[in-house]
Image (cartoon, helix red, strand yellow):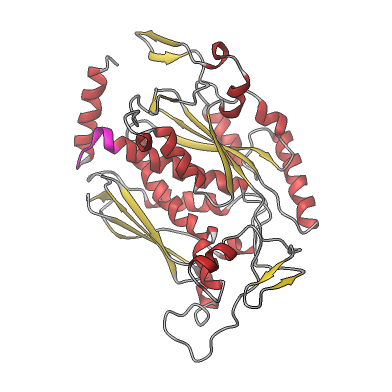
Amino acid sequence: MFRFLTSGESHGPCLIATIEGIPANMPFDNAALDAELRRRQGGYGRGARMRMEHDRAEVLSGVRHGLTLGSPITLRIENKDWANWQEKMSAAPVAESPEAVTRARPGHADFTGALKYHQRDIRNVIERSSSRETAARVAVGGVCKQLLAQFGAQVHSHVLSIGPIGAEYAMRDLIPTTWDDAFWQRVEASPVRCADPDVAARMIAHIDSIRKAGDTAGGVFEVVATGVPIGLGSYSQWDRRLNARLGMALMSIPSCKGVEIGGGFACAAQAGSQVHDVLRHDDERGWWHLTNHAGGIEGGISNGEPIVARVALKPIPTLAHPLPSVDLATGENIEASRYERSDVCVVPAGGVVGEAMMAIVLAEAFLEKYGGDSLEEAKAHVAATHELAGR
């Protein structure tokens, strides 16, 4: 019922996202999509490319007069840097091919991609494996956020740590039943998207020191979805479990090396009596839990609590002082790979991509459960399901 594809290269004319399955008659806010794209471009530690691009989503199909049509939605995001790459990235043959990139950067898709697709020029790998592609995913996630918001669900993120800074902050119990608006306002006001100003200041200082050293920094961000109804996902098959789908989506983010849901790895060291969330019911709140170590998912199904996931990003592998590598054209061991213009730290922006991926997974699971070719039909299905559940 719901699917999407992205296409485009990092220095090609544009990125394209095509979304199928969004119900008809949903209010569509183009300005909100552009705001999501700006959030992705921000964050302390970003590089020169983000100062060059001014991402906005141009709607090519599927929307009329501010409402979705039920047909595929096509979004186009222009690459401003294309003006400087028209000959190098020309789709048509050129009189003289640009110098091939043959020095593989450790940690990138350069080596594996070149061998897999039998490419003599690593540029053909770099262009699609670049994190630039995530701009299209953020646009798709922005549409999914608008769908979820129609039913009271919201998705946010914040940074827990950058490098070694913030580890103590990350270990705090950051899985309360609700996060208030003031918390998210502090996050969005922070250059590193961290709610604790003292920790944020130390994160910024760490990024500055890493930049001076010609190195890069990774970290951990947390994604939180509130207002998610009970019943998304299933235990019936392994690939229908909501946590499995969410894990795959978050692991697809470039530089991601780890995902945990709820209490995650910390739960492994605790006794069962300390981990499992006690269920309660009353007329005012309906179904609720005393704690949320499960991160909002039990048995592969959303349980009505906030869905909480943490994502670990490795430092990006493009270094100002490149590591040793191999020239794929000659097989020669070399002292230094190549340097592409890059960021120093992408963790704050990574959180925005994480929001998009969580919103995409939740929108897909939501439409699977409730269906509806129009927003009105979907709302009727939600109301009927809640009545059956006694909510």
Report the residue at 39% width, 22% height from top: 303
Report the side of 311 relative to 318 (left or right).
Answer: left
**Could you say which is closer to the camera, residue 208 or residue 242?**
242
Picture quadrant of residue 297 = top left
Report the side of 133 relative to 375 (left or right).
Answer: right
Image: 278 above or below 348: above
Report the side of 365 relative to 177 (left or right).
Answer: left
Quadrant showing the C terminus:
top left
Residue 331 magenta-highlighted: no
Report the residue at 63% width, 21% height from top: 269
Query: For the magenta stretch, what is the residue range?
Result: 367-373
Residue 372 magenta-highlighted: yes
- Residue 126: x and y in percent read 55, 67
- Residue 211: x and y in percent read 76, 55
Image: 186 above or below 99: above
Report the residue at 46% width, 26% height from top: 306
Picture quadrant of residue 46 = bottom right
